Image (spheres, rainbow, N blue to C red):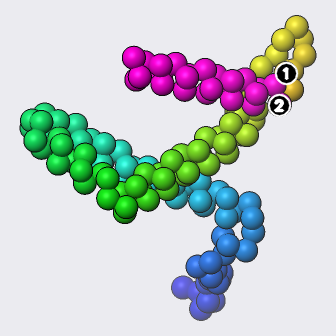
Amino acid sequence: MTKRKPYKRELPTDWWLKHAFYTKYMIREGSSILITLYSLILAWGVLRLSQGEAAFNGWLEALQSPFSILIHLLALALALYHTITWFSLAPKAVDLWLKGKRLEDKVIVAGHYGAFAVITVFCLLIITL
C-alpha cells in the first residue's frame, strides 16, 4: 500500500457561473427539469379530462392562477432558449452536401428556423379550426 495522498481537485459549486459557455450549457440542460414538470402538469390535465367535465374545469381554473401563469411563461422561455441553442448546434450534427460542396452553417440554421415557423403555423391552424 502506498502512503501517497490521492489528488483531490477542489471545485467550487459555482464553477459553471464563472464562464459564459458553461453557464449557457447548464441553463440549457437544467431547463429539462422544468420542462419535465410542465409535461407532468399537462399529463395531469389529460387525467382530469378522463374524469369528466367538472374535474377538467377545475384543472383549467388551477392553471389561471398567477403562479401557474408564471410557470407557463418560464417553461415557454426555457423551451425557446433550448430550441435556439439546439438550432445553433445543428450544423455540427448535420453534415449536408449539395453538388460536392458542404452547405454553409447559416443555411442549415435558417432551414431549421423555417421548418419551425411552418410547423408552428400549421399547428396553430389545426388548433384554431
The residue at 32%/53% (across/down) is 64
Residue 98 pos. (x, y %): 84, 11
The residue at 37%/63% (across/down) is 67
Give the main secondary structure of the magenta stretch: helix
Residue 73 pos. (x, y %): 48, 53
Looking at the rendered structure, the kind of residue marked 2 is: Asp
Q: Which mark is residue 103?
A: 1
In this view, the residue in front, 56 or 36, is: 56
Q: Do the residues bearing badges 2 and 1 touch, measured as CB atoms within 8 Å?
A: yes
Pointer 1 local density, CA inside 10 Å: few below 14, some 14–19, many at least 20: some
Q: Is 116 positioned to the left or the right of 72 in the image?
A: right
Residue 102 makes an appearance in the image: yes
In this view, the residue in front, 48 or 65, is: 65
Looking at the rendered structure, the kind of residue marked 1 is: Leu
Q: Quadrant of residue 2?
A: bottom right
Give the magenta part as a residue range: 106-129
Q: Secondary structure at mark 1?
A: loop
Q: Which residue is mark 2?
A: 105
Residue 32 makes an appearance in the image: no
Instruction: Please determine whether, in this image, residue 129 is positioned above or below residue 6.
Output: above
Q: Is 46 positioned to the left or the right of 76 in the image?
A: left
In this view, the residue in front, 73 or 75, is: 73
The residue at 75%/35% (across/down) is 92
Magenta span contains residue 53: no
